[in-house]
Image (cartoon, rainbow, N blue to C red):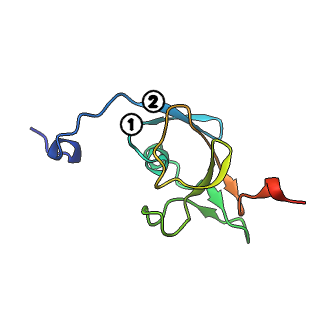
Amino acid sequence: MRRTPAALVRAEPQPAHTIEFDGRPVPALPGQSIAAALWAEGILAWRTTRVGGRPRGAFCGIGVCFDCLATVNGRPNQRTCLLPAGPGDTVTTQEGHGRADLAV
């Protein structure tokens, strides 16, 4: 038997579902975080900084650094490393502080 993390914990993964990232379908496993699903698809950045527009993605993976913020289902500033990917979730790249809808 091949030793994998799933085999070691005797996990029985369910079928993948799909989330959408910037209009692109991305497969995700039940229980998988949005950040993990994006990483698995080769997507490494989904936010830009307020100053300079530099790309950011998951860094710490435990919700401390806030580099993984994205707009999820229309809600800005969601920590994708902590948020499970739900079937049909829509994730969009967040630019700056994600509060453009509040601009005057």
Residue nearer the viewer, 89 or 23: 89
Question: Nearer the N terminus, badge 1 or badge 2?
Answer: 2
- Classify mark 1: residues with Cα within 10 Å, few (<14), some (14-19) or many (20+): some
Circle number at residue 30: 1
Query: With 70 as the anchor, is 17 left or right in this view?
Result: left
Q: Residue at x 18, y 46 (%)?
A: 9
Q: Is residue 93 left or right of residue 58?
A: right
Which residue is pictured at 68% across the width and 44% down the height? Answer: 74
Rendered position, 85 above or below 52: above
- Provide residue 71's location: percent of width, then percent of height: 64, 49
* Label 1 close to label 2 by CB (< 8 Å): yes
Q: Nearer the viewer, residue 1 or 62?
A: 62
Callout 1 secondary element: loop
Q: In this rendered view, identify the residue nearer to me: 88 or 102.
A: 102
- Looking at the image, residue 97 sits to the left or right of residue 104; the answer is left
Coordinates of residue 21 in the picture (x, y in percent): 60, 41
Q: Which numbered dot is residue 11?
A: none
Residue at the disc numbered 2: 17
What amino acid type should be assigned to the residue bearing mark 2?
A: His
Q: In percent of the image, x 43 and y 45: which residue is there?
A: 40
Residue 2 percent location from the top left of the image: 13, 40
Mark 2 falls on what kind of element? strand
Q: Residue furthest top?
A: 15
The local crowd at label 2, few if under 14, some if 14 to 19, many if 20 or more residues have their Cα within 10 Å, is: some
Task: Classify 43 as above or below 18.
Answer: below
Label 1 is placed on what type of residue? Pro
| Number of marks | 2
